[in-house]
Image (cartoon, rainbow, N blue to C red):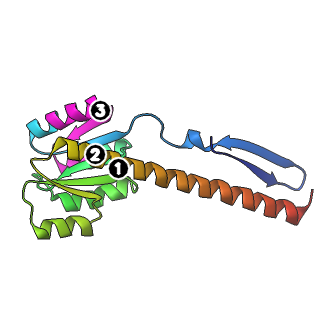
């Protein structure tokens, strides 16, 4: 359990507060936003992902995806390259604004070197070709979510370390 103590010095008293960082982080199942204009693909992938234990929400276009990402937290988004109202690479940039640490996987039925380069340039974390191999998709999702969790834990450890160091500095400066 990650926890830290904050000591706040005032002129007349010392306030000591212990808290857990776990309360500030997402716990439980990972949430995935699946964005594809093809209803069959959305439904099929949603079922597969739910059977793997993920919480899945779907969107059929970019506008709906952005609205949902403002209203909900998602660990990961699976984004179709061609949507009726927006190109997938533009959408992943917009999703980065709503949830900066969301992992993004780009799917396309139109693979070219240019689409792959564009996806990477727009910070897609993975680029898969339709029809997607479900085993490969699940493996990639797992890998990316593990990396996301490790990054979150690293950040939490740095926050705890900063608070502990800063508390010691304050205590040494102001004395007991």
Mark 2 and mark 3 residues within 8 Å of each other at the beta carbon: no
The residue wearing badge 1 is 143
Quickly name the residue at label 2.
139
Quarter of the image holding residue 119? bottom left
Q: How far separated are the C-alphas under marks 1 and 2?
A: 6 Å
Is 36 rendered above or below residue 104? Answer: above
Residue sitting at the far left: 110
**Residue 155 horizontal/vertical position (percent):** 54, 56
- x 75%, y 44%: residue: 17
Quadrant housing the N terminus? top right
Residue at the spot x=19%, y=70% of the render? 117
| In front: label 2 or label 3 | 2
Depth order, front residue of 67/171: 171
Residue 137 included in the magenta stretch of the image: no
**Residue drawn at the location 35% of the way across and 51% of the way down:** 144
Q: Secondary structure at mark 1?
A: helix
Residue nearer the viewer, 164 or 16: 164
User: Does dot 3 land on a helix, a strand or a loop?
Assistant: loop
Q: Which residues are magenta?
A: 44-67
User: Where's the C terminus, which quadrant?
Assistant: bottom right
Do labels 1 and 2 touch, CB within 8 Å? yes
Q: Residues within 10 Å of mark 2 (few under 14, many from 20)?
A: few
Q: Which mark is residue 44?
A: none
Crowd class of label 1 (few under 14; some 14 to 19; many from 20; radius 10 Å): few
**Can you give x and y, in whole percent of width and height, for residue 161 in the image?**
67, 57
**Structural distance between the alpha carbons of marks 1 and 3:** 14 Å
Q: What residue is disc 3 on? A: 52
Q: Are marks 1 and 3 in contact (CB under 8 Å)?
A: no
Q: Is residue 176 left or right of residue 137?
A: right
Between discs 1 and 3, the one toward the N terminus: 3
Does 55 appear in magenta? yes
Q: CA distance from mark 2 to mark 3?
A: 11 Å
């Amino acid at each position: 359990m990650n926890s830290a103590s904050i000591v706040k010095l005032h002129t007349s008293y010392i306030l000591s507060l212990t808290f857990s960082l776990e309360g500030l982080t997402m716990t439980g199942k990972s949430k995935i936003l699946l964005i594809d204009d093809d209803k069959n693909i959305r439904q099929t992938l949603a079922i597969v992902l739910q059977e793997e234990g993920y919480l899945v929400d779907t969107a059929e276009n970019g506008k709906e995806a952005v609205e949902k990402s403002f209203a909900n937290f998602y660990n990961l988004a699976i984004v179709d390259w061609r949507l009726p109202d927006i190109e997938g690479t533009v959408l992943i940039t917009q999703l980065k604004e709503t949830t900066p640490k969301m992992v993004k996987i780009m799917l396309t039925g139109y693979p070219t070197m240019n689409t792959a380069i564009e996806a990477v340039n727009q910070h897609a974390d993975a680029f898969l070709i339709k029809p997607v191999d479900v085993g490969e998709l699940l493996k990639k999702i797992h890998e990316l979510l593990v990396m996301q969790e490790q990054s979150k834990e690293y950040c939490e450890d740095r926050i705890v370390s900063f608070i502990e160091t800063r508390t010691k500095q304050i205590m040494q400066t102001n004395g007991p």
